[in-house]
Amino acid sequence: MNSLFDNTIQLLTKATSFTSLRHNVIANNIANVETPGYKAYELKFEHLLKQALDTSNEGFQFPHQNLRLTRKDNQPILVLDTTQQPRLDGNTVNPDRQMAKLAENTIMHNAFLKLLNMRFKILRTAINEKA
């Protein structure tokens, strides 16, 4: 396999987009911490990344030029966060937990960006070496 033209960039770009979407969901939860009856949400996408990396899964095998993360059924899933008990006003947002999720998501986002940047550096070096 030619490692210079694999699907890493496409996968990292998609992962970065997903962490950005998750950031918006968490920020919305935090913004509604005082809204009576508001239910906290989570954005799940790790299953998509796992499937994309699992070459034994028939629906996600890597054809050389096409990482198939664009099908409609391959979207992140927005679900209610059922891990928290509702307060007396019905709100399920735990601000401490949401801030921890935000920090974790930020670390993941930055890691994906760093990997993407390293990949572009490799490509840039390969291009300059051939010139």
Image (cartoon, grey):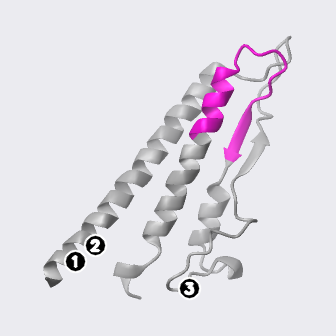
User: Which amino acid, by three-letter code, is at mark 1?
Assistant: Ala
Report the magenta residues as a range: 23-43
- Give coordinates of residue 15: x percent, y percent: 53, 56
Q: Residue at x 51, y 66 (%)?
A: 11
Up the image or down, 69 lies above or below 108; here it is below
Where does label 2 land, which residue? Answer: 123
Quadrant of the rendering where the C terminus is positioned:
bottom left
Contact? badges 1 and 2 (CB < 8 Å)? yes
Q: Nearer the viewer, residue 49 or 73?
A: 73
Q: For the residue labelled by badge 1, is the local secondary structure a helix, a strand or a loop?
A: helix
Q: Which label belongs to residue 126? A: 1
Which disc is residue 63 wearing?
A: 3
Residue type of the residue flagged with mark 3:
Pro
Q: Residue at x 63, y 33 (%)?
A: 26
Q: Is residue 12 left or right of residue 120?
A: right
Is residue 32 one of those drawn in magenta? yes
SS of the residue under disc 3:
loop
Between the residue at mark 1 and the residue at mark 2, the CA separation in whole angstroms equals 5 Å
Instruction: Check the image and report above or below for 103 versus 47.
Output: above
Q: Earlier in the sequence, mark 3 or mark 1?
A: 3
12 left or right, relative to 59: left
State the count of labels: 3
| Cα gap from disc 2 to disc 3, whole angstroms | 20 Å
Whether residue 33 sits left or right of residue 8 in the image: it is right
Q: Position of residue 71 (x, y in %)?
A: 70, 70
Residue 38: x and y in percent read 80, 23
Callout 2: helix, strand or loop? helix
Residue neighbourhood size for the residue with mark 1, other residues' Cα within 10 Å, grouped as few (<14), some (14–19), many (≥20): few
**Numbered tag placed on residue 88 in the rendering:** none
The image quadrant that residue 107 belongs to is: top left
